[in-house]
Image: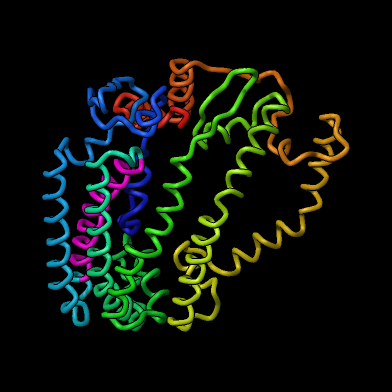
Amino acid sequence: MCRSHLVGSMVEGNLIRHITESTSPLARECFYWGPTHAILGWTMSDERAWDVSPMVDGASTEEVKQMIDKAVADAQSFVNLSKAKVAAADIDTLQEILVEYEEHKVRTHDLTTYCSLRYGACTKDSENAKLNNWGQKAEGEVEAAFVALDIKLGQRVLDEQRIVDAPELANYRHFLEQLQREAPYRLLEAVESVISLKDTYGIKMMSQLQESWVSAKTFDVEVRGEKKTLTLPALSALRMDPEREVREMASKTLYESYAEDELLHGFALRSICADHIALVQKRNMPSPMEQSLIDQDVDRETVDALLSTIEDTSNKYRDFLGLKARYMGQDRLPGYDVIAPWKEELAWEFDWPSARAHVIGAFSTFDDELGRVIKDMFESQRIDSALR
């Protein structure tokens, strides 16, 4: 993988939490993080259960805390030593800095991601809560430290295009271009560090509160005469049920829940938007979109083209909805039928072993090596397959 990705794609694409099905509401919220780990008296050894212990080599909670503290201290020490070198560094020295930059970023991201996955899968577990707090604190401290180095690097590449174009730094070109793009809007180092900490304990916490609230909700419903208690994802999945009555029930229950929690959702959304606008103005950006364009690594022209395409072809989508309504015997397609299947009969249905073999076979047909990678993902318990 190209080093210029630095963090995110190297970590988040590899680790997905797994929340298992259980008759116990608490156990249903928890996930499996070891080969035979018992959760509150409930043990799971199914290959479909996700195992995140390799992220920390099977370390205990206290050992993970020590690993986090060391990773943060090492990262801060690296930044303090490196930021003074950037202004006069030659290409070789910059390459050394970028290599070590990536190593520290990936290591801390591995640890904080492990913490967030543990907590996200079982928010009622006290150890998971401790890990999540440690991870959030570490994330804020590391980001606050690295912003100083980002400012130095950004100013250097803004002034010297040759650095971005240097063949020796080809693997980092994309990352340097991002720093170059953001450099004109950077504030003073001390201000940027405070903003990083503010984001960790402020807007990110607000977002997590909203997500945690939604993920913890359950719904008592009746499906084809059977009373069930469903999580939000399980309820949402029923919006594609072959039976119209089930789809209608699921859709109404889901959106009524959002309406009941409108204060929480509205407050979270307004807070996030207000924070975004305030920072855009503070950075003197040309539009409220600019920060999002930088964060999402896209230009304004691309977004405008996408929006124009949607607007120019919206009549085609309306035609499609009208066609589907007629096919389903409706004058006007109800909202709960928009994503409904066209037929009540299932096109196909797989049990787990068949689905596993089908997926591995599909990738293997395309490329033998890729097929082996996918097979290893199944065998190493890196597939999130259960309905949450």
Q: Nearer the viewer, residue 223 or 328?
A: 223
- In magenta, the rendered stretch is 94-120
> Which picture quadrant has residue 45?
top left
* Residue closest to the far right: 331
> Which picture quadrant has residue 328?
top right
Q: Going 27% across and 36% down the picture, which residue do you hit?
A: 52
Residue 140's spot in the image, x, y percent?
Answer: 27, 63
Q: Going 38% across and 25% down the picture, which residue do you hit?
A: 24
Please give left or right for residue 112 compared with residue 295 in the image: left
State the colouring used for the structure image. rainbow
Q: Can residue 244 be seen in the rendering of this structure?
A: yes
Q: Going 26% across and 32% down the picture, which residue do you hit?
A: 33
Figure quadrant of the C terminus = top left
Residue 226's spot in the image, x, y percent?
Answer: 59, 18
Residue 105 inside the magenta-drawn segment: yes
**Vertical placement of 265 versus 176: above or below?**
above
**Vertical placement of 20 versus 87: above or below?**
above
Residue 246's spot in the image, x, y percent?
Answer: 67, 27
Please give left or right for residue 349 compared with residue 72 in the image: right
Please give left or right for residue 223 compared with residue 202 in the image: right
**Magenta-highlighted stretch: main secondary structure?**
helix
Residue 159 inside the magenta-drawn segment: no
Q: Going 44% across and 40% down the picture, which residue do you hit?
A: 216
Q: Nearer the viewer, residue 102 or 257?
A: 257
Q: Can residue 370 be seen in the rendering of this structure?
A: no
Q: Nearer the viewer, residue 354 or 50?
A: 50
> Which picture quadrant has residue 181?
bottom left
**Vertical placement of 365 versus 304: above or below?**
above
